[in-house]
Amino acid sequence: MQTSKAIMAWNVFRFCTALRGLGSIMILLVLGVVGVTYYAVVLMNYGPLLIDGGLHTLASLAVLIPFHGLLAMLLWSYFSVVVTDPGSVPPNWRPAIDEESGEADPLNMSQYSGIQTGDPSHPKVRFCRKCDQFKPARCHHCSVCGRCVLKMDHHCVWVVNCVGALNYKYFLLFLFYTFLETTLVTVSLLPQFIAFFDDGEIPGTPSSLATTFLAFGIDLLELGICIECYGIPYHAHIFGGG
């Protein structure tokens, strides 16, 4: 018991604030992945096919048109998550008399004087000791941002922001467009990947081939992350349920 109290007093979560320093690095890393993918798909493989004519041109257009459309939506949704505030508790916010019934009459602080000592007579009232203020249901304190976030899902280092009430929609769209984009890239680069191991030689310089394989591997990994780690169907279900 004494050990657990000592750990809580030490507050290991204060080290989470170091993640703020990854902000610009993570954004540059995401843009770097986009750049490698664009170079491999457009400049090295399908862009040159546009001037060949015939079926090669049609195949190139069939890849490049949806690729650019999905890429535009992916970047829009990504930066929307990055720049949109997830939502925070308004200053001096007080719980309503009955949150479930929708009554919005504020209560005096004196009526909640026992909240900091864990008074069981107010089980629905939540108080953040770090922010020194009340917080509504599904609101959690983020150790990275140093504040309480409304309907907080998690702090995502890839978007350098918390995912909460006001940017959850953009986060879900970012996952959706990333899933579609990585699926398209993986399928479009798969023939080059197979041809290399079947024939042992495909057109291109060593650097261009390395870029193509790198893009293929990265997008295949991203596709797996979208499916397994983030759980698009799960987030869609949560979003649909409010």
Image: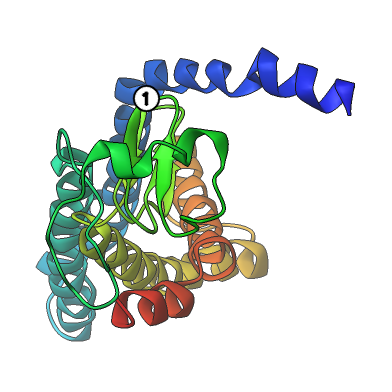
Amino acid under disc 1: Gly
Q: Is residue 188 above or below residue 170?
A: below
Give how far across and how far down residue 60 sits, in percent.
Answer: 21, 73
Q: Secondary structure at mark 1?
A: loop
- The C terminus, quarter of image: bottom left
Give how far across and how far down residue 98 sits, in percent.
Answer: 27, 68
Q: Residue at x 37, y 24 (%)?
A: 146
Residue placed most toward the observer, 57 or 90: 90
- The N terminus, quarter of image: top right
Give how far across and how far down residue 63 sits, in percent.
Answer: 23, 74
From the image, tell me which residue sits under label 1. Answer: 146
Q: Is residue 100 above or below residue 46?
A: below
Name of the residue lying farthest toward the front: 110
Q: Residue at x 39, y 58 (%)?
A: 138
Give how far across and how far down residue 147 sits, in percent.
Answer: 33, 30
Q: Quadrant of residue 140?
A: top left
Residue placed most toward the observer, 179 or 234: 234
